Image: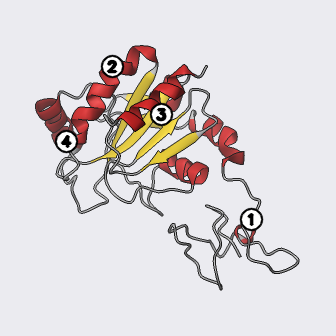
Amino acid sequence: FCCGRCNRAIFGRAVWCKRACRLSADAPHCLQRDSSSARRPCRRSIASNWRELIAELTAIPLTRIDGASDSLANHQGKVLLVVNVASKCGLTPQYEGLEKLYQEKKDAGLEVLGFPANDFGKQEPGSNAEVAAFCERTFKVRFPMIEKTSVVAGQANPVHEALFTATGDRPQWNFHKFLIARDGTTAKSFSSRVAPESSAFVAEVEARLLEK
């Protein structure tokens, strides 16, 4: 058998693969076995439905942390960097690197979207107003911040649920990063430990910005 989410092999009838992708009992297409019963990756493509997902997501309303209306449609044509953020995490200083990257690359077409979430270690306990004040006071954040949300399985907002479908990854901690191409057809996942100012990550961003 293999996982219908991330295509990795699963031995026996486990419901979780090594990447913590849950197989739903009411979604039999997520389990496939070939005629020889050999254990090998499924051919189901995770990104195959990404265009359709993006088309659907652009119609989903978002709310900014200040209560203003927004949607992914407002950011079409830009390279999107989606990050689940937290104010009381050891990685919270990444705000500084994210803001620096945003200021340096926004004119080239980069948009950073911060999604505050209290999912990991309860490290974002404040209200939307408190989170916004912290970001302004401590890091002078100017990139768009979305209202508090969740990114974990069963509770994830529509954007992160679609990113899971596209990449097979869910955030396992604060400051997980998803980089989405301008045309919305590809997305790449980066762990929380990848610093936004690291040369390798900046190179990834610049490569996406060069794409039309």
Q: Earlier in the sequence, mark 1 or mark 4?
A: 1
Q: Quadrant of residue 50?
A: top right
| Nearer-the-camera pick, 14 or 57 | 14
Q: Earlier in the sequence, mark 4 or mark 3?
A: 4
Q: Earlier in the sequence, mark 1 or mark 3?
A: 1
In the rendered image of this protein, does residue 140 appear above or below residue 190?
above
Image quadrant in which the C terminus is located: top right
- Residue at the extreme top: 107
Q: Position of residue 81 (x, y in %)?
A: 43, 35
SS under mark 4: loop
Kindly identify the amino acid type of the residue bearing the numbered disc 4: Pro
| Nearer-the-camera pick, 206 or 187 | 206
- Any mark on residue 57, and which? none
Pointers 1 and 4 in contact (CB under 8 A)? no
SS under mark 2: helix
- Any mark on residue 204, and which? 3
SS under mark 1: loop
- Any mark on residue 104, and which? 2
- Any mark on residue 42, and which? 1
Q: CA distance from mark 1 to mark 2?
A: 41 Å
Q: CA distance from mark 2 to mark 3?
A: 14 Å
Kindly identify the amino acid type of the residue bearing the numbered disc 3: Glu
Decide: few, some or many residues near mark 3? Use Cα within 10 Å; few <14, some 14-19, many ≥20.
few
Image quadrant in which the N terminus is located: bottom right
Kindly identify the amino acid type of the residue bearing the numbered disc 1: Cys
Q: CA distance from mark 1 to mark 4?
A: 40 Å
Residue at the image position 72 percent from the left and 53 percent from the top? 45
- Any mark on residue 93, and which? 4
